[in-house]
Image (tube, rainbow, N blue to C red):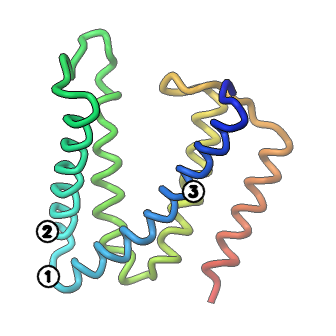
Amino acid sequence: MGATQPQAWLFAALMLLAGFGIPIMAALNGGLAMRIQSTAAASTILLAFALGCALIVTLTTEGIPKTVYQSSTPFYYYMAGFFVVFYTFTITWVGPRFGVGNAVAFVLLGQLIAMTIIDQYGLFDSPQISLSLQRIIGLVFMTAGVFLVVRN
């Protein structure tokens, strides 16, 4: 893939930590929504706080960007925020009603399906990684695992 072995371990560790944050965020924001009785307001608060954090990181590590728009960049690259908003609103609403674990388990399954499609076709300038028997078996096991985890 291009990453050295130490880089691969660092990348894996960072993404593992990011993964820990997803159910924590879901539980915190779902709890906030229940307390203030508004999914939309809780999601907006989360996103506003996230924007503030992102601006602080951007300005302290890179300074003021010289450009944020290039006409040669396809418009859909600017649409990633839609998925953040969709995820935030749905996990905030569904989590307290369905269980954070159940909700995140299905998010994981959706991620696995989407990543397989993105990798298979190298979508959005991602490296193309062909679907192999090993990947298919892994997806089957992960899917079974999700259903075993959410089963009551």
Going by the numbered disc 2, the residue's amino acid type is Ala
Alpha carbon of mark 1 to alpha carbon of mark 2: how far?
A: 8 Å
Residue 34 percent location from the top left of the image: 23, 84
Q: Residue 115 falls in which quadrant of the image?
A: top right
Q: Residue at x 30, y 35 (%)?
A: 79
- Amino acid carrying mark 3 in the image: Leu
- Give the label on residue 16, or none: 3
Circle 2 Cα neighbour tier, 10 Å, few/some/many (<14 / 14–19 / ≥20): some
Instruction: Please identify the residue farthest to the bottom as the structure is shown.
Output: 152
Q: Are marks 1 and 2 in contact (CB under 8 Å)?
A: yes
The secondary structure type at the circle numbered 2 is helix
Mark 3: secondary structure: helix
Residue where numbered disc 2 is placed: 41
**In the picture provided, is 130 more to the left or to the right than 101?**
right
Crowding at mark 3 (Cα within 10 Å: few <14, some 14-19, many 20+): few
Say which residue appears at 16% left-offset and 61% top-offset. 44
Residue 80 is left or right of residue 13, and the answer is left
Q: Position of residue 149 (x, y in %)?
A: 65, 78
Of the image marks 3 and 2, the number of the one nearer the N terminus: 3
The N terminus appears in which quarter of the rendering? top right
> CA gap, disc 3 to disc 1?
31 Å
Observer-nearest of 131 and 56: 56
Q: Position of residue 104 (x, y in %)?
A: 50, 68
* Front label number (3 vs 2): 3
Residue 126: quadrant of the picture:
top right
Instruction: Name the kind of residue labelled 1 in the image.
Output: Ile
Of the image marks 3 and 1, the number of the one nearer the N terminus:
3
Q: Which tag is nearer the camera, tag 3 or tag 1?
A: 3
Mark 1 = which residue?
36
